[in-house]
Amino acid sequence: MIGVGGTDWKHYVRRKPQVVKRRVRKGIPDCLRGLVWQLISGSRDLLLMNQGVYEQLVLYETSAAELDIIRDISRTFPSHVFFQQRHGPGQRALYNVLKAYSVYDRDVGYVQGMGFLAGLLLLYMSEEDAFWLLVALLKGAVHAPMEGLYLVGLPLVQQYLFQFERLVKELVPKVGAHFEKEMINPSMYASQWFITVFSYSFPFSLALRIWDVFLFEGVKIVFRLGLALLRYCQDDLIKLPFEKLVHALRNFPEEALLPDVLLPLAYNIKVSKRLEDLRQEYERMKETQSNPVKTTHK
């Protein structure tokens, strides 16, 4: 499907998109994951069009975020061997990628959650490849841009949480009603799901399979997976009071996080049309808030 160095990929995706989708959902073979991620995200093309740019950003530019990046480096995947050694190759690569991005896109700069994205990518590809994949994601080379997750005020996080809360009420109504009663809202448990695309505090085996699908199909897999988790655990969740609920939503049982259990459940939850309706509703709501109707006094 890939051809030598990815030469056949675009042709194959155009001809047999459903076959590619099925294969990606089954899980990309680990030895090919890095290359396929670059092909499905559009980052390989960005790299080829911008030869030498990454080196320039790393070597010759300075970033206002350098101290923040250094402070956070050791907190990114602290238990993974690649990032454990202080100032080791993993931490150096992570610093370079994040520093380069903060210079490349000064509007976004650097936000802590980005470290988990870059860290995951660096396990499968070189610094330069990881940098351009980060650019592809945040700038929207293939899917909707992710940069709104990291801009001041986290505008895209707010939109996604609004959509997710409504979907929980509609598709997992028992959980939705219980959350409302216990005053649990998605910002208490789901923000990290969107900001790090499940790469933070979820088993690696699951995170990688989610990323395979996320890069090919876009953010809707994050919604589907979140809903599948709540549906799988609903019998336990609806019995819990507030404090225990907050804990449970950050510590799901092991069997709920098995890729071959959770992913098929997620694929069966259809959200595309509803997500678009809710996005439009959210935009109308924001517009109304920023332009309230002025009442005139006589």
Image: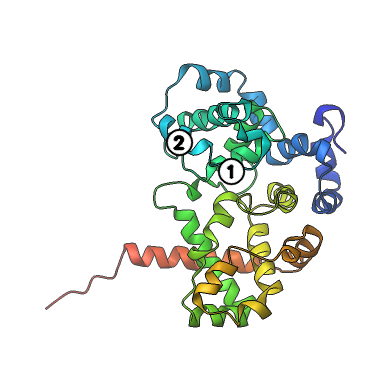
Q: Secondary structure at mark 1?
A: helix
Horizontal relation, residue 167 to residue 110: left or right: right
Q: As shown in the figure, which amino acid type bears the numbered disc 2?
A: Arg
Left or right of 183 on screen, residue 221:
right
Disc 1 marks a residue whose amino acid type is Phe
Residue 230 placement, left or right of 111: right
Give the distance between the C-alpha atoms of the residues marked 2 and 1, in whole angstroms. Answer: 14 Å
Q: Residue at x 38, y 63 (%)?
A: 287
Near-viewer residue (137 or 71): 71
Please tell me how crowded label 1 is: few (under 14), some (14-19), or many (20+) other residues with Cα within 10 Å. Answer: many
Q: Is residue 40 visible?
A: yes
User: Residue 209 has which mark?
Assistant: none
User: Residue 108's spot in the image, x, y percent?
Assistant: 45, 40
Q: Position of residue 130 (x, y in %)?
A: 64, 33
Q: Is 53 located above or below residue 91 in the figure? A: above
Q: Say which residue label 1 marks.
A: 116
Residue mark closest to the camera, 2 vs 1: 2
Where is residue 296 shown, x and y percent of the image? Answer: 17, 74
Residue found 42% across the figure and 38% down from its top: 107
- From the image, tell me which residue sits under label 2: 71
Q: Which quadrant of the structure image shows residue 134?
A: top right
First in sequence, mark 2 or 1: give its number.
Answer: 2
Give the vertical position of 195 relative to 49 (above or below).
below
> What is the number of callouts on the image?
2
38 versus 255 height, above or below: above
115 and 45: which one is in front?
Answer: 115
From the top left corner, tell me how far across and down residue 88 is, in percent: 60, 26
Q: Quadrant of the N terminus?
A: top right
Under tag 2, what secondary structure?
A: helix
Left or right of residue 154: residue 13: right
Quick one: label 2, few (<14), some, or many (20+) residues within 10 Å? few
